[in-house]
Image (cartoon, grey):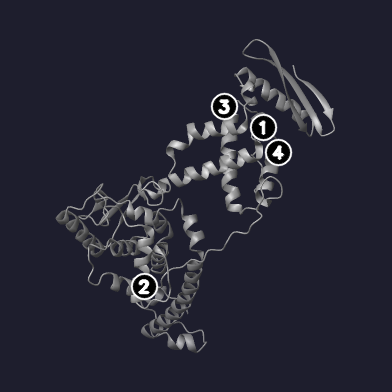
Amino acid sequence: MASYKKISTGWQFRISYKKRDGTYGTKSGNNFRTKKAAEVAAHNLELELGKGLKLEAGKEPFVTYLKRWYRLYKESSLRYKTKASYNYSIDRATEFFGLTPIEDITEDDYQAFLVDFGTGKEVFKKPHAKETAAKIHTHLKSAFKKAVKQGIIIHNPAEDAKVVAGVAKKSEELKYLSLKDQELLRAVLTYKMRPNNPSRYICLLSLDTGLRISEVLGLTWDCVDFKNNMITVNKTWDYQNTKDFDKTKNPSSMRTIKVNALTLQRIVELKKYQEESNRQFKDLVFLTYQLLPPTDNAVNKTLKTYLKRAGIKTMITHHGLRHSHVSLLIHKGFDIQWISKRVGHENASTTINIYMHILDEMQQINDEKLELLAAEEFDNAKTMQNVLKLTDFVDSGKKIDPPQTPLNQRFKQV
């Protein structure tokens, strides 16, 4: 049976339960606005106890549980960069909660953690951006959710928490090449290409596909379908840390896309060169003399060289080639859902949010096109009036029946 008590902060319930060792313990819940709410919570807890709720496990420090949860349920499926992000979250939780038992962390405690991380006024010595705080919140909330499901705690203290930011997110300028500049770059990249400079081939392929740098570097020859002019992205190359293959950014990044046949004809040159010079490693498409893919710095230096050679003033990095490709597709009227799948976004909303500026430009262009179309349609209507000999009927304003022909019986006055 549960007992109830009115305290200064609301209603409290307390129940007793039998532990695995045969002894008895108690569990309480506090801060309920009404006695009814406390009764509902107590009843739910008693039901869970009947199913084997592991209340003793709630004595374990939250960070200990967090590390085990990460190791068992997350680590094996994550990319290197994502692993680093989770470890950052674990370190921050350790810094704030210390050895606090998981069952003792209340909603107020967790919200205080988010506030302090965002503002940096107490435990954390500097404020943080909302994006960073939101990522940590996502990780910890997921861990608490698992603890609830496992019967270790009653409710998730992070469920209704609000992320707090003390640093404004830096606005990133979306840099991309105009359609004319893309033509100029393609011209200089393809002039006297030499397979001993794979960075030029990377820039050309990226301009025509919008692949991320890690996706391009991770391409192997079995991913290139020369017969059907297709490329499959099923892995990446970690050029910063492991110098080896890695998972794609997300499941949606695994895709097969159509590629310009002329671009693939250039890529064939690399395959022939590798076979003739016996320079092959892990079946990679792009290799340097060191038998490793070029670094992102090497690709960016090459790109900068050829942008200058083409007389292009807009200086972009490799990622700007991805933006340029999407810009081209949007301006040519390709469906946004199709574009989203082509570049490996999780959904079309991501594409829309990133390229909103370009979409707004296209909105203005389409509005102008609509006005021209309307004017053209009225001109066509006037021409049709002449063909149907409706000039007097329209211009005189008199109610004169037009000459009845099989065609103009279906026309009304314009």
Residue located at (39% from left, 63% from top): 318
Distance from the alpha carbon under mark 3 to that under mark 1: 19 Å
Q: Is residue 68 left or right of residue 281?
A: right
Label 1 secondary element: loop
Q: Nearer the viewer, mark 3 or mark 1?
A: 1
Residue 164 seen in the figure: no
Label 3 secondary element: loop
Q: Nearer the viewer, residue 253 or 123?
A: 123
**Whole-percent x and y of residue 241?**
41, 48
Among the two numbered marks 4 and 1 on one chain, the one whose residue lies closer to the N terminus: 1
Distance from the alpha carbon under mark 2 to that under mark 3: 57 Å
Amino acid type indicated by mark 4: Asp
Q: Which residue is mark 3?
A: 150
Q: Which residue is mark 2?
A: 307
Among the two numbered marks 3 and 4 on one chain, the one whose residue lies closer to the N terminus: 4
Among the two numbered marks 2 and 1 on one chain, the one whose residue lies closer to the N terminus: 1
Mark 4 vs 1: CB contact within 8 A: yes
The answer to whether residue 64 is above or below residue 309 is: above
Q: Is residue 364 left or right of residue 295?
A: right
Q: Which residue is mark 1?
A: 100
Q: Nearer the viewer, mark 2 or mark 3?
A: 2
Label 2 secondary element: helix
Q: Which residue is mark 4?
A: 109
Residue located at (49% from left, 60% from top): 352
